[in-house]
Image (spheres, rainbow, N blue to C red):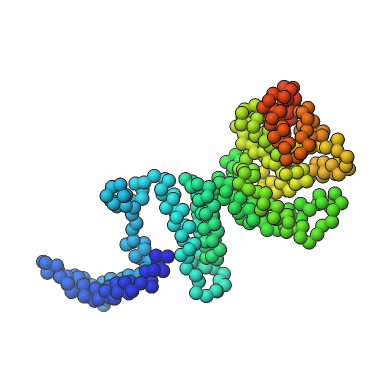
Amino acid sequence: MVKKVVKSSQSFEALSRAFIDFNENFKNDASKDGISIQSFIGDINQEIREWDVSFGVNINEIKPEEIIKSLLSHYLEDKHLQGHKMDLSSFGQGLQRQLIYTLIKLSSKYKESPARKEKKEFNPDFTLILFEEPEAFLHPSQQEILNHSLKNLSEDKKQQILISTHSTHFVSKNIDTLSSILKLYKNNGETQVFQITDEELKSILTANKDLKTILGGTIENKDFDLEGIRYSLWLDPDRCCAFFADLVLICEGASEKILLDYLIRNEVIELPNREVYILNTLGKENIHRYMNLFKELGIKHSVLFDGDENKKNQDYHKKIKDFLESNKNNFTVKIDCFKNNLEDFLDIPEDSESYKKPLNVMWHYQAGKIKKEKIDDFKQKIKDLLNI
């Protein structure tokens, strides 16, 4: 932006003309003791005359790049210090990050539009921006705005943005371009990289429809698009915690997740040196979608769901159970299920309204209505799934 302003500035034109005049005149200007550049050049040429060459001096033409690189400086004025100009390094990381965030956000606004489109095998003006943990010191809403600005910048074919992050907001806001997300693991000093290519993503979305066929459904043309939309809608900042976990426990519903999160948070279930995320899939019909995704991203996972053997449509639930067992991959640690459901396993009454089930389970636990041996059995089941 500064370069664009400098190049089109009348002041820069005047400065360039002044440099031309300066280049022509300064050689004859002499110091108080009579020494000039021209006399100095004459002395040098006198010494090298036998070589049939002559020495000369010019002042280089001033360019916008030189102004930006060597002459342009920035500062901050502290209003509490009577406007004293201070270097950015005098301030804390919070303000420094805020300023970087602001500049990047504005750069997408002020980026220069190309005069003409021209396909090149190599672009000498290509810019690679590497940004480490851009979320540092930013509020979640600011993270989302910064992510939007970075995406706008990356749309320019001359620029690529590569960020490393621990922010679930940055991951979630880029789920619609899953192939742009890389998952890194460090194992015995060696870093492994997992990335879903566009072709692998197509394979995942295709495989996600297999269960529908097994359950007797008909695959429609829009089903492929719906699979991608599901990931975009479901992988919110909370579920994107799965991308940063050592192990993900994939659960069928909210009741298991809420109870498990509570037990882990209150150290009823202890997780020594492990980062575990409990993921609610909104129904066991969706579990395989996460298994397929985690396989390609190298995310270790276990699975827990309801067997529903007390339900009328036994064939339906058995097909899902068999399908999930057959869908194991190299990153699936273990698959387990309750014979019927969580409430039956804990020996508590089941609420007839499904949306109240998490409340029902938590009330029975906090009111001390669940027998200790049932809680112990539940804890052991979870420990087996988490390989503790």
* 4 or 41, nearer to the observer: 4
| Residue 282 occupies quadrant | top right
| Image location of residue 348, percent across then percent down | 77, 28
Q: Residue furthest left?
A: 33
Q: Is residue 212 visible?
A: yes
| Residue 325 occupies quadrant | top right
Number of marks in the image?
A: 0
- In the displayed structure, 28 sits above or below 99; it is below
Residue plotted at (52% across, 75% down): 116
- Quarter that holds the N terminus: bottom left
Residue plotted at (64% across, 56% down): 176
Q: Left or right of 61: which side holds 320? A: right
- In the displayed structure, 335 sits above or below 196; it is above
Residue plotted at (39% across, 44% down): 92
Q: Is residue 46 visible?
A: no
| Residue 277 occupies quadrant | top right
- Quarter that holds the C terminus: top right
| Image location of residue 177, percent across then percent down | 63, 56
Q: Residue furthest top?
A: 372
| Image location of residue 312, percent across then percent down | 88, 40
Q: Residue furthest front?
A: 353
* 366 or 95, nearer to the observer: 366
Q: Left or right of 349: which side holds 160? A: left
Residue plotted at (73% across, 54% down): 227
* 316 or 75, nearer to the observer: 316
- In the displayed structure, 134 sits above or below 335; it is below
- In the displayed structure, 164 sits above or below 123; it is above
| Image location of residue 255, percent across then percent down | 71, 36
